[in-house]
Amino acid sequence: MDVYEAVTSRRAVRGFTDQHVPKHVLEGVLSAAAWSPSSSNLQPWHAYVLTDGPLAELKKRAGERLAAGEPWDEPEYEMYPPALKSPYQERRSAFGEQRYGALGIPREDLEARQRAAAANWDCFGAPAALFCYIDRDMGPAQWADVGMYLQTVMLLLRAEGLHSCPQMAWAKYRKTVAEILSPPDKLVLFCGMSIGFRDATVGDARTGRAPLDETATFVDAY
């Protein structure tokens, strides 16, 4: 698979089979992803990979919290600005329509939307998950470095025939994740990532992208 194919075939998959993901594949992906760029080579990421029993235990505990109606953990970073302006709000709304429309869930059915969102805590059935942390003393530039690292991981997973779904939602259950992983206090959970083989029987829709002229400006002599 060439780079262009990896980029254009990558998607946030929300339905996985239970097919085992070999440990050596995950080790190879993360070893290669370590070459991701970072300012002054700080490499400010720290990844934890969960499979088998530990992942099952995390899913169980998260499911119990959900069933009990427990509130989310207090945020350690702001996922979105308090008020999204145009065109970002429109893009977010369009994503919601596509996401739930593919599942046959109408806009007004909030209960069904909540049930679909709850699948986050089961990693959408994935047999492997990655949890990416960053040192809480790091600044915006290092958070950008972590984003580049995660993108590299996702593209390498595609090269191995695997799919993924990055999930900031896990930051809402960060304390439950910490019960399993025991990360040092200096680390902040940025996101989780479900990893596995896509279940083609699960309905989903790939969200579109803005036209190039909305996101890029060419300044040249042509």
Image (tube, rainbow, N blue to C red):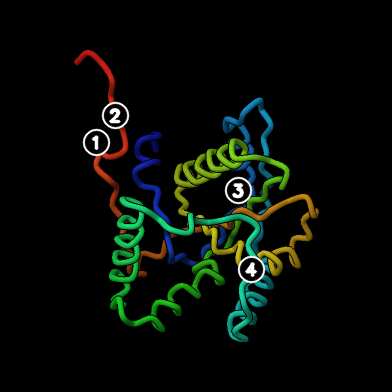
Q: Nearer the viewer, mark 4 or mark 2?
A: 2
Q: Quadrant of residue 218?
A: top left
In the shown orientation, is residue 146 left or right of residue 217?
A: right
Q: Position of residue 210 (x, y in %)?
A: 27, 46
Question: Secondary structure beneath disc 2?
Answer: loop
Question: Disc number at residue 26?
Answer: 3
Question: Can I make out residue 63 in this image?
Answer: yes
68 and 12: which is toward the camera? 68
In the shown orientation, is residue 134 left or right of residue 216?
A: right
Q: From mark 3 to mark 1, how far is it between C-alphas?
A: 37 Å
Q: Earlier in the sequence, mark 4 or mark 2?
A: 4
Which amino acid type is marked by label 1? Asp
In the shown orientation, is residue 195 left or right of residue 222?
A: right
Residue 193 sits above or below residue 176 on the image: above
Q: Estimate how packed mark 4 is, as few (under 14), some (14 to 19) or many (20 or more) residues with alpha carbons within 10 Å.
A: many
In the shown orientation, is residue 9 left or right of residue 124?
A: left
* Badge 1 vs badge 4, beta-carbon distance below 8 Å: no
Question: Disc number at residue 217?
Answer: 2
Which residue is rendered at x = 51% and y = 58% of the image? 196
Q: In the image as oriented, which residue stretches furthest toward the left?
A: 222
* Badge 4 vs badge 2, beta-carbon distance below 8 Å: no
Q: From mark 2 to mark 3, how far is it between C-alphas?
A: 37 Å
Q: Earlier in the sequence, mark 4 or mark 3?
A: 3
Q: Estimate how packed mark 3 is, as few (under 14), some (14 to 19) or many (20 or more) residues with alpha carbons within 10 Å.
A: some
Give the position of the N terminus as an image quadrant: top left
Question: Secondary structure beneath disc 4?
Answer: helix
Question: Secondary structure beneath disc 1?
Answer: helix
